[in-house]
Image (spheres, rainbow, N blue to C red):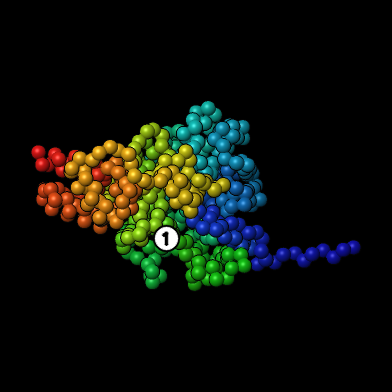
Amino acid sequence: GEDLPAPPSPRDLAEILYTSGTTGTPKGVACSHENLMFHELPPDGGAALPSRISFLHAFPVGTNAGQEVLRLPLRRTGRVAVALAVFDPEQLGAAVAEHRVTRLQLVPAMAQVMLDSGAHQRHDLSSIERVTLSSAPAPPVLLSRLAEALPGATLCNAYAMTESGTARTLLIAAASRPGSVGRPVGKSEVRVVDDEDLDVAVGDMGEIWLRRPGAPSRTYYLDPEATAAAFATGGWLRTGDLGHLDDEGYLYIDDRKKDLVISGGTNISPAEVERVLSEHPAVADVAVFAIPHPVLGQDVAAAVVLASPATTRQLQDFVRSRLSEPKTPHRVVVLDQLPRNASGKVLKRELPALLDAGAGALGPADEGPLSPVETTVLAIWQEALGREGFGAHDDFFELGGHSLAAAQIAARLQAAFSPDLPLTVVFEHPTVAELADVVEAIRR
């Protein structure tokens, strides 16, 4: 007969999983057989699992999370894993009711859609004992809504990466630690380091490193340079995420290194701005990202999905009242939905093009004759911005304005009209018409 192929060795390639590719091209992560079998503890924290439980998830099968859940029945008897082909809140509710699902695993965006759709009210979800959210920190407002919708379920937020394998953190949701993704699970370890790879002080932000001592490392498929860049000595994975630890070892994700907006020398965390905007009652979904700026290098922009009407000015004022001016999105585009990949992660690399498409072209506005004060203010703006072809109602920041130009305009206005004009006047009244009204009011 034919010779049988040699059985694979533990170090042979077993599967290739792909990263989400939210900020760039997805990378293939190579996993060996020994890596996949390195699971002496269950993935939800090491607690003993009941013999009869069922999992439901809607992760793509080719992702790390999708494979993790599907392999559970192979490692432990008495488990059932149900995978939805695509995420749909009605299908999810029906599957929970039909299979009496006890463990639900979602990304925060899926949970948000489920709650917004009302599917949890149309289906019997009483069998759910535990909901684990992964891929992103769960906003406190989302956890609060889930707790109200699923009062019998324990809510968890997990943090891991395709490259980290079994190394992860887990938090059982607690109001005392909003925004945390917990502490290391089982034998997992976490560090937060500076640019010199030295541990930072408690509370300071740095890059998050993960490892599981003894676990066979994963690699980037056929890319030794990327592998060497991502994996440090001692089995540590450089996650590329920025975060900090509190004094009890709880981890908080602050942002992705690649997502940081560096504006005029100031490092701005999009995640921080997103957290603030998500608290606005009119905002259903939000993503904050960097756009090029000719003077500052980069500026802050936001894409929002609205649950109720709101103006750009209202959203900007909301952020400005809680954060500093440089962190306020100076351009905002309203979308029907944010672009996401199959795992529910926002594709931030697509947002700048959507911003340009949604912003429209700026040109001379047919606004009628300007008042003498408006004419003077407009001339000051044109000089500070180095451009013409805009009207009295165009927004300073959408015209390319920045903090340095705002300070120059404020100084010129003080010299031309009144020293009582505050330096913040351009931020608070970012159109020529509004500024002219302020000047007129002070002169009366």
Residue 200 picture location, percent across and down: 35, 65
Secondary element type, mark 1: helix
Q: Indicate the quadrant containing the N terminus: top left, top right, bottom left or bottom right.
A: bottom right
Amino acid type, residue under disc 1 in the picture: Lys
Residue at x 60% of width, y 41% of height: 86
Occupied quadrant, residue 358: top left
Front residue of 282/236: it is 282
Extreme residue in the top direction? 122
Residue at x 41% of width, y 37% of height: 306
- Work out whether residue 428 can be spotted: no
Residue at x 61% of width, y 32% of height: 98
Residue 266 picture location, percent across and down: 31, 60
Residue at x 27% of width, y 42% of height: 392
User: Left or right of 443: which side holds 326?
Assistant: right
The residue beneath circle 1 is 257
Extreme residue in the front direction? 369
Q: Indicate the quadrant containing the C terminus: top left, top right, bottom left or bottom right.
A: top left
Up the image or down, 355 lies above or below 263; here it is: above
Residue 84 picture location, percent across and down: 61, 41
- Work out whether residue 98 can be spotted: yes
- Crowdedness of circle 1 by 10 Å Cα count: few (<14), some, many (20+)? some
Residue 224 picture location, percent across and down: 57, 70
Up the image or down, 382 lies above or below 142; here it is: below
